[in-house]
Amino acid sequence: MKKVIIFSLMMLLLVQFGSMAIQAEEYQNYQEVVFEDDNANLLKDFSDKDYDGYLKKITKKRFIGWKIGVVNENAVVEFVSETKLKIYNNGFSTIKHNITLETEEETKFQLSASGGIKVSLEGSEKKFKGSVDADIKASVSYSSVKTQTEKYEFEIIVDPLTYVKIITRGQGIINNGVAKYYFFWLNTKDGGWETFTLTTEYYEIIKERI
Amino acid sequence: MKRVFGLVLAVFLTVSIILLAYEKDIITEVSIITFTNSYSRLITSTKEAVSIPVYLSSEDSFLVEPDSIDNTSLISEEFTLETKINEIRNSGQSEELEGITYYLYYYDITFPNLNETNYFLESDDVNLIITYQNGDSITLEIGDLHLRFDEIVETGYLELYRLYSLASPDEALIMKGIVVGLRNKSINEIEIISMDIGYDQCRLDLGNANYLEGVPSSYSDILAAFGESEFIDNPTAFSLNHDQLIWIPLSYLSDGIGINRFPMVINYSYQGQTYEYLVDDFQFFSSNHSLEGNYGKLREFIYHYQ
């Protein structure tokens, strides 16, 4: 009896009732993310009902470890990101401004997770915490794309009472899904995961009156 | 005595093995790879740099130390121009090609002796020659250069208020044209006569320019509205009465020109007078500097250590 109680207590300790808060990265805050496929959704837009439904689809159990369910695989998205830069001229004479922009590697590949799945950063490498990373890698192809930090300068005249802003648009690939963790064939925790790989980033310059 | 000799021999052998194990491979040569790109730039100051992507097979070389450079120049059939390399930036990226790992650097070239305005420098097949303080030189093929040295000045009657590009959705990512918003700051009509982007093999096709009602977000929107266009040489001028968003296709005279950045020189007519409006070179989308993606454009120079 004692053994059963101790085992049950151990099991309870192992069960993590993770909140559904999403560990979000930059792409979650983009002004607009539009999927090519109208039925596809971002992880943050999964309803509780959808989420439970996706979890139920994972029927095979494991002795110990994660079982992955893929919801959207290599889904193409177009996005409008946040404004990269804004220069105001509130004065009464024109100003000449030298804009320097730099693309950063870390914005090219991003991860999100919810529930019992966490994101970790080891050095410059982003990954899902624990063994779930390898399981997701085995289910969908996700690796950082080969890009480079690039900087460029653009000189522009900003007229009085106008502002100049630079926004980025682009295309990317989303993979997302859910996962269940099993311990002695018992489902002890679950969570959602998502990878975002930026494929192309377009720059747009807009000059407007204040 | 025998024991002492044996001990000395054992220590000697152990030390030798350790030294051999930790000794780095002696590098006898460095393979340097460049692309034959097309560069079109408006250089507005002596500090402005043109960044040349260069791959090297070694990170541990004086070839990437600006302090070890004695002099640099750009040489083509048309000109020889003294330049300066102030900075060599390690991008932190590496790529494998035919079993060799290459590291991507950017060599930032400036033109300290060119402080002129309205000065042009154009040539195909330009080489960057770097001479190091040990007297050795390397020759890097960098492609075509179209440089204009000028300053951005206050605009006259015309002003840019929006600019972005639309590209083909496939993997090759070819810029299909630009969406440009032009503001007529006067109360009279302006005629756009020409828009030059510097490149020989690629032009803005003004003959197929179209006024836009909305803001297209993809090239598919353009195809749906106007279809594919045939290049019209010597187009007639188009007029501008107010703020206008315009779609201007790009026409390529040869294949394989991957461009993502250029300035614009807009010539326009206002009340019988011709004016010029300069827009600095704008990077429309991120560059693809991968070796794999530029295979046909790769050029190699091998530096042998003496």
Image: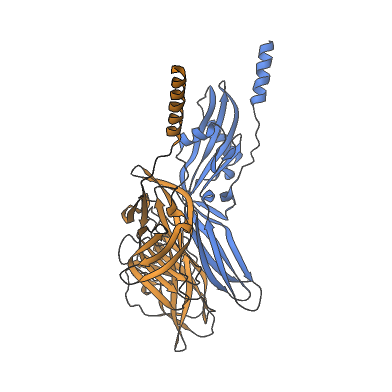
Front-most of residues A100 and B142: B142
Front-most of residues A82 and B63: B63
Q: Looking at the rendering, in which quadrant would you find the N terminus of chain A? A: top right
- Residue positioned most to the bottom: B272
Q: Residue at x 45, y 65 (%)?
A: B84
Front-most of residues B30 and B110: B30
Spot occupied by residue B92 in the image (x, y as percentages of width and height): 48, 49
Q: Residue at x 44, y 27 (%)?
A: B12
Spot occupied by residue B216 in the image (x, y as percentages of width and height): 47, 63
Number of numbered discs: 0
Q: Residue at x 46, y 48 (%)?
A: B93
Colour for chain B in the figure: orange
Question: Residue A114, can we see it?
Answer: yes
Q: Could you tell whether A125 is left or right of B53 in the image?
A: right
Determine the image quadrant of residue A2.
top right
Front-most of residues A117 and B227: A117
**Chain letter, blue:** A
Spot occupied by residue B154 in the image (x, y as percentages of width and height): 54, 79
- Residue positioned most to the front: B1
Q: Could you tell whether B63 is left or right of B76 in the image?
A: right
Question: Residue B286, can we see it?
Answer: no
Q: Looking at the rendering, in which quadrant would you find the C terminus of chain A? A: bottom right
Spot occupied by residue A26 in the image (x, y as percentages of width and height): 58, 50
- Vertical placement of B256 versus A17: above or below? below
